[in-house]
Image: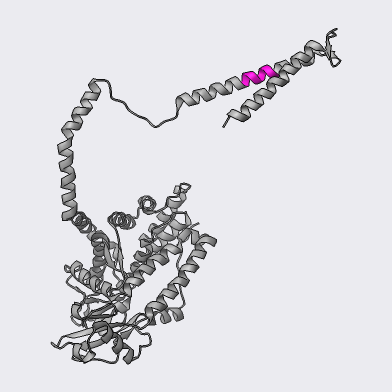
Amino acid sequence: MPKWTYWTLSQRYLNALERLQDNVEAAPYEEIVETIEKGLGVRLSKAFDTFDKTPLGSASIGQAHRATLRDGREVVVKVQRSGIRKRMTEDLEALEAIAEYADSHTDLGRKYRFSGMIEQFRRSLMDELDYQCELQNLREMRQSLQEFVNIVVPEPVDQLCSSKVLTMEYLDGVKVTELPGVAKTELDGDALADEIFRAYLHQVLVKGTYHADPHPGNLLVTGDSKLALLDLGMVGRVDERMQDNLLHLLVAISDNRGDRLSEIAVRISSEPNHQLDKRAFTGELSELVGKAKGSSVQQLKFGSIVMEIMRICAAHGLLIPREMSMLGKTLLNLDRVGSALSPDFDPNESLRRNIGELASKRATDSLKEGDFMSAVLELKELVMKSPQRINNLITNLSENRFRVDVDAIDERGLIQGFQKIANRISFGAIIAALLIGSSIMMNIDSEFQILGYPGFAMLVFMLAVASAGLFSLSILRKDD
């Protein structure tokens, strides 16, 4: 009986990993100043009116300091740790070696293709190490999320940014998991959880670019009860084909359609399994969505469901694209954020409520100016060439020159093969009859003898042996 699998860590490990969000040991202040002045090409005192030596938060890649610009605006300066790129590269090389070994020598590796996951992680991490990429992500995400009034993205200060320094608007707030009890009672958690869930569906299914690291350290509740989205160094990208498939996949989960879910999973797979046991595969997915439907609101986690779908696909020999692993990780983080904002938030109900609008936006957004012009040009070519093509078709039909080529079995070759087999069988029967006849004639007395045996019988026997030899030689030389 297939079981719904969960991966769990002890609280001790969870607490240690959570420290890595924004509570890593800070880098020396002198090192931070050197990185800023080298990256911006200006002295710290010239770029900022004030600069707080104590960081707001420290993570594994960099740390953030509060500062004030010359015009009085409050900003946050994100500074990359010295030498972190070299250390990250070395760590990634070690992970790639481990993943390649696992893929070659373990069943788990052959199912999940860890090398692909590590490659996807490497690309995202390299982008995260270049703050110019994050600067572009900030601009893109501010534009993408304009319609969500309760979600804010800090505005970057372009002239004070480099590959290792990122200056952006300061947004004051509290981590979603550290909200005090009074603030929770005053906060409309249901509306905020619904909005962040819709915003991520919008990013993934409509825009195709989403914030891929929404852990609680990167989402703050501001003083005016809005959600601030921070640290946009890691983003995920989804192409149009995958967007369509993901939309169908989420609808299948929401509608408890295991059969439909199995079809979509096979379609998404980058390497089809021709020996797939469809009945068992569909059964496991139906059981999964059935349990999800029967779960309480607190237990219903889209991230866990997506990760479990990936596990079931791998167990049945279907290779899911590496983009799905990053999306699953993002949804797992988002599950925790939603629970922190509103324990009673129901993502399934929110999906049902918004799926029509998402599908409409998805279709509208697909009609971009470039795509529309391309379609118009193709339609123009079709209209202009159709009369000539129709005329050629009618001419060929009237002159009996219309021919249909069918890629089927070569009937002529098949018949020739059958004829060869029949001839071989008949010739073999004749040789056998000659051998049997010569054996019978050996018992007949005759004055004409060869080697002490009746001569006629020996002649027939030698004829049979010679024919059998030539027959065997012909088979060896001519048959494939």
On the rendered structure, is 193 left or right of 478? left
Q: Which part of the image, by quadrant, shows the C terminus?
A: top right
User: What residue is shown at x 18% (from left), y 28% (from top)?
Assistant: 391
**Above or below: residue 409 compared with residue 184:** above
* In the image, residue 105 lies in the stretch drawn in magenta: no
The residue lying toward the viewer, choosing from 155 and 293, is 155
Quadrant of res 194: bottom left
The answer to whether any part of residue 196 appears in the image is yes
- Residue furthest left as drawn: 71
Is 426 a magenta residue?
yes
> Is residue 390 shown above or below 91?
above
Span highlighted in magenta in the image: 425-431
Q: Residue at x 23, y 89 (%)?
A: 43
Q: Position of residue 108 (x, y in %)?
A: 50, 61
Q: Is residue 339 visible?
A: no
Q: On screen, 179 above or below 305?
A: below
Residue shown at 18% from the left, 91% from the top: 49
The answer to whether residue 400 is left or right of residue 459 is left
Where does the image place residue 150, in percent across and percent down from the top left?
19, 73
Instruction: Give percent across and percent down for residue 275.
Output: 48, 47
Residue 185: image x %, image y %? 24, 80
Question: Going by the image, does 423 lie left or right of 370?
Answer: right
Q: Main secondary structure of the magenta part?
A: helix
